[in-house]
Amino acid sequence: MTRFFVSMVLALAAASPFSAQAQTVSYKRQIAPIFASNCNGCHNAKTPQSKLTTENFHGLSTGGRRGKCLVPGKSVDSLLIQFVDGRKTPRMPVGGSLKPAEIALLAKWIDEGAKSDGEPTAGGSKALFVKPKEGMLAPISSLCWSGDGKRLFVGDYQEVRVVNPMDGTTIQALTGCADAVRSVAISPNGQMLAAAGGLPGQSGQVVIWNVADLKPIKTLEGHTDNILGMAFSADNLRIATTSYDKTVRIWDIASAKSTVELKDHADAVFGATYAAKGKYLVTVSADRSVRVWDGITAKRLYSLAGTQEPIMSVSANPTADIIATGGAERVVRLWNLRAETGDNFRTFSGVPDTITDVSYSPDGKWIAGTCGNGQCFIWDASNGGLKQTISASKQPLLSVRFAPNSETVAIGGNDGSLTIWNSATGVRLFPAPEVKQPIK
């Protein structure tokens, strides 16, 4: 951010309702609410992504894994501003962005010394802080279906919930996860369920259960930060994991050992998939790259270039040598995969916000993409025609997966919401739509 841009956004702030309350920015009344609305879901005491807590002034002033996030008096040099304005990636908050006036307000507060005038209390700004009747729900950043479509596995905080998709009830909670579950997956043979996550800034973890009886059978531990993405190999013998620590690891499931570590990415690696019936392993990263590896030897084959922003997700077409990617660029790109190179042959545009997850339907006919504005888009994979626009939440969406029938889709949100839809008609199946009574 240039000093000219800082001056410009400060001028915007001066005209905003925030600045009308006081000449000096109040942490308690003006800054803390920004974090509460946009950041505390990931950067709280229970799930401090990158070891940073934004829910109180002490956590902000202490900083996280990347160091101090505030440089009092120097907003331009503060990591907080650099991540929210996009100079550093991945841009925060993941799945959305702050308004220019909010960024300007944060910058003004830092330039004024980044001081605290107390934490928000129940007796303070009642319009902004209302005590919830129930506990906060953990973001749902991962979903997968059982092979028969009768169970939905939902990544939650320290557990995987087994959900009945007919009525949304939790059948069972699978525990043993160290922290938030960032990725869940079923093995191609349908016999294993894996959940990946770990401790932010410390380690990665994968817990594996037997699908038949839901008993834990393996735990894989490694990485120096939590795991963001995961994929089973086509032969059910290996798992690939991607991490915030910029590496990709290949694990032998039988021995529970990491056999390969790939260090080619320059930033956090968000996702992985095995494509073309296991011929290729594809990984995507905040470094804006798509890297293609040999699915058996893990030898790097080539990179796919052309994306201008961090890539958040990747999904393989089950019926062709094609992958779909999506991210902060606000488009879905389709790529052909070949032994020596690949190409971006189709792009779906017109999305209003960051694409946080993409998923092919099992029959390969449809592609779903969740968006930071709370909408899910479903496209015809053959021509890019928009089939459905589903408004699933008022908060950013994080995950989407088609059921085995390719006509039912589950969507998870940053607010902990879980909704299930008929992708052909756009009708919500769960929670059941409210029936309005006729006026008498």
Image (cartoon, helix red, strand yellow):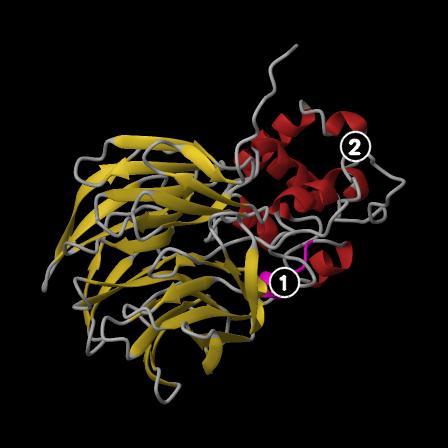
Please state if 398 lies on the left or on the right of 157 as rendered: left
Residue at label 2? 127
Query: Quadrant of the rendered structure where residue 407 is?
Result: top left
Q: Is residue 52 inside the magenta stretch? A: yes
Q: Tell me where residue 170 appears, x and y as whole percent.
A: 56, 57
Please state if 255 lies on the left or on the right of 107 as rendered: left
Q: Tell me where residue 214 appears, x and y as whole percent.
A: 47, 73
* Separation of marks 1 and 2 at Cα, in angstroms: 26 Å
- Mark 1, secondary structure of its residue: loop
Task: In the rendered structure, find residue 374 and report the number of the disc placed on it.
Answer: none
Which residue is outermost to the front? 440
- Mark 2, secondary structure of its residue: loop
Which residue is outermost to the top? 440
Q: Tell me where residue 38 appears, x and y as whole percent.
A: 61, 44
The boundaries of the magenta stretch are 49-54
Q: Residue at x 79, y 49 (%)?
A: 115
Query: Quadrant of the rendered structure where residue 191 is?
Result: bottom left
Q: Residues within 10 Å of mark 1 (few under 14, many from 20)?
A: many
At label 1, the amino acid type is Pro
At label 2, the amino acid type is Ala
